[in-house]
Image: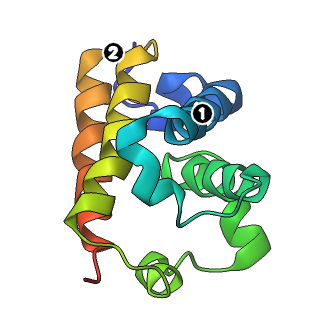
C-alpha cells in the first residue's frame, strides 16, 4: 500500500473508521476492565460514537467533519469535566488496542496509530 496516502485512506476510509468506532464502543460496553471508562459516558452511546467517528475522520486525514460541526477539537478542555486518571486512560487504550488488533491494516500503520492514540490518551489525563 502507498505510504504517502493518509492513514484514513490507508485503513479504508469512511467504512473502516465507522467499523473502528463501532467495535471500540462495543468493547467498551462489554469488557469488564472498561467498566470505569464506560461509566463516564452516557447510557446511549450513539452521540459518543458519532463524535468519535467525526473526530477520527479528520484526525486520520479524511474529511474534517468534527471541526465543521463543533469547531476546534480542544480535546483536553472538552475532557476536563471527566475524571481521567491512569486507570481510565489504560481502559480506553485497552479497548482501542483490541479494536486495532482486530482490524485489517498494515502493521506499520497499526503501530503508528497505537503510538499516536496512546500519546493523546495520556494527554487527556487530568487526575
Q: Is residue 35 left or right of residue 68?
A: left
Between 49 and 112, the one nearer to me in the picture? 49
Q: Which numbered marker is on residue 26?
A: 1
Q: Is residue 21 left or right of residue 126?
A: right
Does residue 95 sit above or below 74 in this rendering? above
Q: Earlier in the sequence, mark 1 or mark 2?
A: 1
The residues tagged by marks 1 and 2 sit, at their Cα atoms, a distance apart of 23 Å
Between 112 and 79, the one nearer to me in the picture? 79
Q: Which numbered marker is on residue 106?
A: 2
Q: Is residue 78 left or right of residue 118?
A: right
Q: Is residue 99 left or right of residue 51?
A: left
Percent coordinates x, y for residue 48 in the rendering: 67, 57
Labelled pair 1, 2 in contact (Cβ < 8 Å): no
Q: Which quarter of the rendered picture does the N terminus lie within?
A: top left
Between 2 and 65, the one nearer to me in the picture? 65
Q: Residue at x 21, y 45 (%)?
A: 115
Which element type, helix, strand or loop, lies under badge 1? helix
Q: Which numbered marker is on residue 78?
A: none
Q: Residue at x 55, y 50 (%)?
A: 56
Q: Residue at x 36, y 27 (%)?
A: 98
Q: Residue at x 44, y 58 (%)?
A: 37
Percent coordinates x, y for residue 5 in the rendering: 45, 31
Q: Is residue 82 visible?
A: yes
Which element type, helix, strand or loop, lies under badge 2? loop
Residue 4 figure quarter: top left
Tag in front: 1 or 2: 1
Q: Residues within 10 Å of mark 2 (few under 14, many from 20)?
A: few
Q: Residues within 10 Å of mark 1 (few under 14, many from 20)?
A: some
Amino acid at each position: 500500500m502507498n505510504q504517502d496516502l493518509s492513514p484514513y485512506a490507508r485503513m479504508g476510509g469512511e467504512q473502516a473508521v465507522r467499523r473502528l468506532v463501532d467495535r471500540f464502543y462495543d468493547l467498551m460496553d462489554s469488557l469488564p476492565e472498561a467498566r470505569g471508562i464506560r461509566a463516564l459516558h452516557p447510557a446511549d452511546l450513539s452521540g459518543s460514537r458519532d463524535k468519535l467517528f467525526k473526530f477520527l475522520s479528520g484526525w486520520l486525514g479524511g474529511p474534517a467533519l468534527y471541526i465543521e460541526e463543533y469547531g476546534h477539537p480542544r480535546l483536553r478542555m472538552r475532557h476536563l469535566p471527566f475524571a481521567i486518571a491512569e486507570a481510565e486512560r489504560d481502559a480506553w487504550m485497552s479497548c482501542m488496542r483490541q479494536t486495532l488488533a482486530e482490524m485489517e491494516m498494515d502493521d506499520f500503520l497499526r503501530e503508528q496509530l497505537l503510538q499516536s492514540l496512546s500519546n493523546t490518551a495520556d494527554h487527556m489525563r487530568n487526575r
